[in-house]
Amino acid sequence: MSFRKHIVLVGDTHTLDPFLGPLADAGAVVTQVKQVSKVLDTVMEVKPYAIVFLLPRYWDDITLFVDALRAKKEFAQTPVLYVGSLIEGEDQRVLRMKGVHTLTLGPLLPQEVVRYIVDKLK
């Protein structure tokens, strides 16, 4: 499965580590960001194909980030994915209204989550 796209992967090191190998195996080039507050600066610098949040801690910051990202013409169509363990109901509806693909993380192996990410970004 050759993906060959640059993504910004957001989350803490402990959360991201299990996904790095499978993403590399899929062909993704990954820039890691640990703090939501630094994502926009990183996106402006590396101009990725997509942004993927993995189990982020602060949901409100993500909606603000998406609003700020969409306000910039060059990133208005950049895919954003949110993979979280507690994303459902109103939170999920709001993110989807903003064009964010969501996945409620259950007992899935990192390889299965990576398959979802790659499929959504093709």
Image (tube, rainbow, N blue to C red):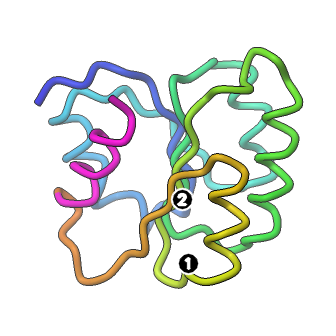
Q: Earlier in the sequence, mark 2 or mark 1?
A: 2
Determine the main secondary structure of the stretch shown in magenta: helix
Identify the amino acid type marked 2: Tyr
Rendered residue at 51%/47% (across/down): 52
| Residue at 54% over, 63% down | 12
Disc 1 residue type? Ile
Distance Cα–Cα, label 2 vs label 1:
8 Å
For residue 45, above or below residue 17: above
Task: State the count of labels.
Answer: 2
Q: Which mark is residue 82?
A: 2
* Local secondary structure at mark 2: strand
Dot 1, crowdedness within 10 Å: few (<14), some or many (≥20)? some
Q: Which mark is residue 87?
A: 1
Residue 105 lies, with reference to residue 29, above or below; the image says below
The C terminus - image quarter:
top left
Against 28, is 16 above or below?
below
Residue contact at pointers 2 and 1, CB within 8 angstroms: yes
Give the percent coordinates (x, y) of residue 54: 49, 61
Q: Quadrant of the N terminus?
A: top left
Residue drawn at point x = 88 percent, y = 31 percent? 71
Q: Mark 1 falls on what kind of element?
A: loop
| Location of residue 27 in the rendering, given as x and y in whole percent from the top left corner | 22, 26
Judge left or right: residue 122 versus residue 85.
Answer: left
Q: Picture coordinates of residue 87 (x, y %)?
A: 55, 78
Looking at this view, is 25 or 49 the one in front?
49
Relative to 59, 87 lies left or right: left
Q: Is residue 23 left or right of residue 84?
A: left
Q: Give the residue at x 64% y 46%.
A: 99
Q: Is residue 105 magenta?
A: no
Instruction: Report the magenta residues as a range.
Output: 112-122
